[in-house]
Amino acid sequence: MSQQRRPLIAGNWKMNGLAAATGEFIELVRLSKEKDNPACDILICPPATLISKMADLAKGSSVAIGGQDCHAAESGAHTGDIAAEMIKDAGGSHCIVGHSERRADHNESNATVKAKAEAALRAGLVAIVCVGETLAEREADRTLDIISDQVKNSLPAGATAANTVIAYEPVWAIGTGKTPTPLDVAAVHAHIRKELGTLMHDSAAVRVLYGGSVKGSNAAELMAVENVDGALVGGASLKAADFWPIVETSI
Ligand code: PEP
């Protein structure tokens, strides 16, 4: 963890959560309020249906709300999609783009992810741009090349440390209970920071999160890795009792 970068602990609820699930969020907000000056940023990205309700519940707390995806356009004939401006309008401040589930399930290319990240910036949201290699790519020793390609080609024009966060999420670690070793995480994060150095003037201040099977029992070890500035958490973000210990590693 770096002195100059404020950690971000972000939860991605994916397609989980009906209105009743906001009870877990209310508990998270309560826990966050027990900390006067949390030393990290806390974010939950619920399904789009809950953004507005949870943004209201988060008022007066240090917990931010975000979207999990957005369309590149501001409005138009795109049935079922959501614009970054709508996320902002509903009370969101961040938007995940390029999650591997979107890249795989919806065939999203780096160019699509970049356009979505640019839409997030246009709407005044912080873009959380996800990158990560598949197991086959890791086994073929292509991890760093894949990451370079994704970072270079998914980064939005106009990216700064204030408006863009990178999340390194090895695809094979998402939802599997498997994690890379701290040494492997360190190698990829150092590589991402080096790439960012060629692309951004304030790259040293950009937060690079780790994501993939982060839980209370491994968070401290992962958050202690050099150049890891927080976590993007899926499964363990759904329950306050699971998520809070991860926050506590950085608070
Ligand atoms: C994710 O979906 O971004 C993620 C990291 O999931 P999990 O923590 O469940 O592996």
Image (tube, rainbow, N blue to C red):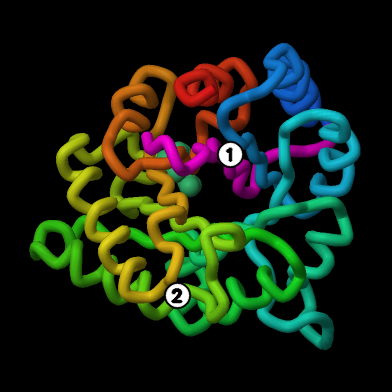
Instruction: Please give the residue where the numbered disc 1 appears in the rendered image.
Output: 11
Q: Residue drawn at (49%, 76%), measured in percent from left and top?
A: 108
Of 204 and 30, nearer the camera is 204
Q: Residue drawn at (31%, 59%), measured in percent from left and top?
A: 193
What is the spatial separation of the Cα atoms under label 1 and label 2, in whole angstroms? 21 Å
Residue 131 visible here: yes
Magenta part of the protein: which range?
1-19
Mark 1 vs 2, N-terminal side: 1
For disc 1, the neighbor class at 10 Å (few under 14, some 14 to 19, many from 20) is: many
Q: Position of residue 12 (x, y in %)?
A: 58, 44
Q: Position of residue 7 (x, y in %)?
A: 50, 37
Q: What is the three-letter code of the residue carrying label 1?
A: Gly
Q: Position of residue 148 (x, y in %)?
A: 27, 71
For residue 214, above or below residue 116: above
Magenta segment, principal secondary structure? loop
Q: What is the three-letter code of the residue carrying label 2?
A: Ser
| Quarter occupied by residue 179 | top left
For disc 2, the neighbor class at 10 Å (few under 14, some 14 to 19, many from 20) is: many
Of 207 and 236, nearer the camera is 207
Q: Residue drawn at (70%, 45%), measured in percent from left and top?
A: 46
| Quarter occupied by residue 216 | top left
Instruction: Please give the residue where the numbered disc 2 appears in the rendered image.
Output: 154
